[in-house]
Amino acid sequence: MLIHQKKSFSNWSLVCLCLIFASCGSSDGSIATYGKKAAPSVAVTPTPEPEPSELEILPLDAVVVIGDSLTVGTEIYGVTLTQSLFDAGVSNVYVSAENGRTTQQGIIELERLSVVEGAVILALGTNDIASSSPEEFGELIDRAVTAVPNNVDIYWLNLYTDQWISDDTYNETINQRADLHANLFVMDFESFATTNWLEEDGIHLSPEGYVNRTAFILAELGVS
């Protein structure tokens, strides 16, 4: 598995989230979960999210995930990402996922959270393939890095699709930006995944695929 920058960490804190296309197939709604050793809550429609002061992000003990409908699916099917992080010993977990979320929308959420310590997982970009150029996507990655201090590690889950628009240029953009930013690391899901996990739309995953996606994320963080 190729990772331009890869780092294991035994002590870390994070805020993370993920994103994908608006037509979500089998993954409906939006998700915002936060807590300490608690099961995630799922909402079909967006609900108000807590202000950053209410998140009580603790040093070396938190993970933030920001994503799209693929992350919504990860929370719904099989073992959820939120509960899996709790089970792996992470005390503070914040997962924000929304169908159709673009990278720009995800970065706005990251900026709103004002993360100062820990680790952030960004699972964004799939919805940008049809709406933004690779150059614009790269600028958004730079913006994500500037949204957190240098001590916060950002893990970007790269794209895995099988559709008429290729994601290769966008994944290469992630790799290039990881070479430029010391605290940006690539989670190379594309090299790990298999087409057997894709649904007919070539974007969303089967329940088995989502379970394996969660396992992959934990392994990359070094907490599985």
Image: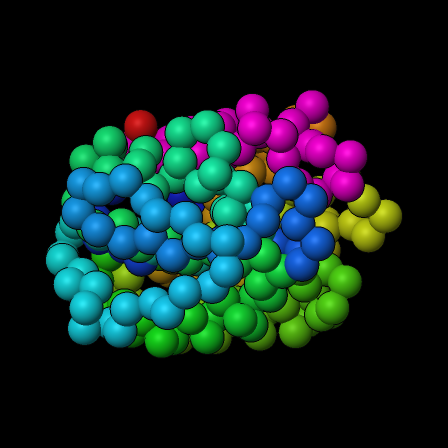
Q: In the rendering, at what x and y percent does residue 95 appear?
A: 37, 53
Q: Position of residue 106 (x, y in %)?
A: 49, 66
Side of 68 relative to 154 (left or right)? right
Is residue 198 rendered magenta in the image?
yes
Residue name at image x 13 percent, y 57 percent = 59
Q: Is residue 2 visible in this depiction of the protein?
A: no
- The location of residue 176, given as percent across then percent down, is 57, 59
Is residue 178 found left or right of 194 in the rendered image? Answer: left
**Looking at the rendering, in which quadrant would you find the C terminus?**
top left
Q: Name the colouring of the figure.
A: rainbow
x then y, percent, for residue 94: 31, 54
Q: Which residues are magenta?
A: 196-223
The foreground one among 3 and 21 is: 21
186 or 210, which lies in front?
A: 210
Say whether residue 19 is magenta.
Answer: no
Residue in view at x 33 percent, y 53 percent: 33
